[in-house]
Image: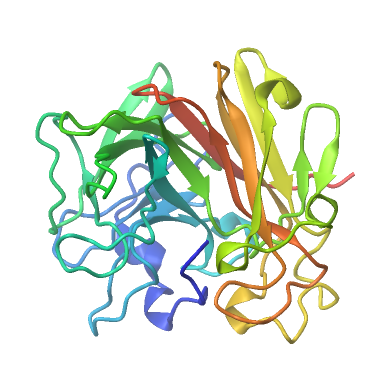
Amino acid sequence: MRVRKWLGLGSWTAAVLLRAGAAIGDGPTTRPAGTRWIRPRGQAGDLPIWGIAGGISVGLWHKDDLGRSDGPRGLLRIYTPYLDQHAGRIMNFIAVEPVVAGDRGLSEIEASDADHAPGKRMTALDRIDPAHVREEAGTPARGVIGHDRDVETLSLFIAVEPFKNGAHAFVKLSFRSDRPHEIELATYAAADSRPMDACVLTATMGNFARLRHLKLKDRTVDATEVFAHAKREFWDFFPWQEWPADQLMQTGDSVTISSTGDADPAEPSTTQPTAPPGWRYEGRQAVQTWTTPMRPGLRARVNGRTTFWGTQALIPGGAAYENFELMAPFIGGETYRFAINEVERP
């Protein structure tokens, strides 16, 4: 997270799941067919939110009828109401950050060419032509319902406005009925994009859940230890730390990195009154996980903070991870799965 000092959404978003879209079918979210999808109805004024009813959902930047926005543009919003969080509570954000000739673009920070305000425009599309990728406002796409054998799926494309470094990326977003707490993101380059070294998908708001415990292959690294002697740099972030793929957890041909927060981040002892209201965690403890196929050059990366973004308020318990990502040389269509699950109790 870089340009953010809010988290709570106004009461107008309390009906997010109701306004976002119609229920499709009558089955519970874990059934392979008849899944109730959250998606726009194809009408003006629909909220741009997609997902599984009772499971994870993803939204784009939007405004209410009074012109109030739901926060910074250029980010995917991740909602996890199954953790006992109120409707509209954002658990994390995902930014799209392509690298060209060593220059990393920032979808949340860079100004749009359309209005010169911060944040690249993101447009949801049911289908996309890499030769003619356009980012246009309008009624949000509904998403396409399909099947992978006996599993029902929902997919759509997110076109991202071109970056200053010449990158022009888009992302395919997919949900599976048998994985109600997970999303899959695949990165692509438009035909007019400059060659990308990497197209990073970074979860940007780890401080909200007090992410401190990063699980590697044979050990867990704590943020308070990783940054114990580090000096804060630009925007008060601690510098990036990284681990190569051979130090990460592996399952079959895939690599996984996961992080958890405090044992109970909602307890008063860890959510001090000094924390800004929007940064006071709500809900059950969760583990956040990235998974991607093993390939050369893959590595896990994190940075961290001791103060909440946009404030001087100290994060209860000390340093916590903020950005949390897997980074690899760009391969068009390569997938990254992001999951948020409740921590299992003994």
Apparent side of residue 1 relative to residue 280 in the rendered image (left or right): left
Apparent side of residue 129 relative to residue 216 in the rendered image (left or right): left
Q: In this view, does 319 lie above or below 270?
A: above
Q: Quick one: which residue is furthest to the left in this view? A: 132
Q: Quick one: which residue is furthest to the right in this view? A: 346
Residue 52 in sight from this viewpoint: no
Q: Residue at x 38, y 61 (%)?
A: 109
Q: Where is residue 158 in the image (x, y as percent from the top left)?
A: 28, 44
Q: Which residue is drawn at 72% across and 27% down?
A: 248
Q: Position of residue 127 (x, y in %)?
A: 18, 34
- Give the quadrant of the C terminus: top right
Q: Residue at x 81, y 78 (%)?
A: 268
Number of numbered markers: 0
Q: Which color scheme did the rendering employ for the protein?
A: rainbow
Q: Residue at x 74, y 86 (%)?
A: 273
Apparent side of residue 327 relative to residue 164 in the rendered image (left or right): right
Q: Quick one: which residue is furthest to the top in this view? A: 252
Q: Please state which of residues 274 and 181 is positioned toward the viewer in this rendering.
A: 274
Residue 49 in sight from this viewpoint: yes
Apparent side of residue 203 relative to residue 272 in the rendered image (left or right): left
Q: Where is residue 215 in the image (x, y as percent from the top left)?
A: 77, 38
Q: Please state which of residues 20 and 319 is positioned toward the viewer in this rendering.
A: 319
Q: Position of residue 336 (x, y in %)?
A: 49, 31
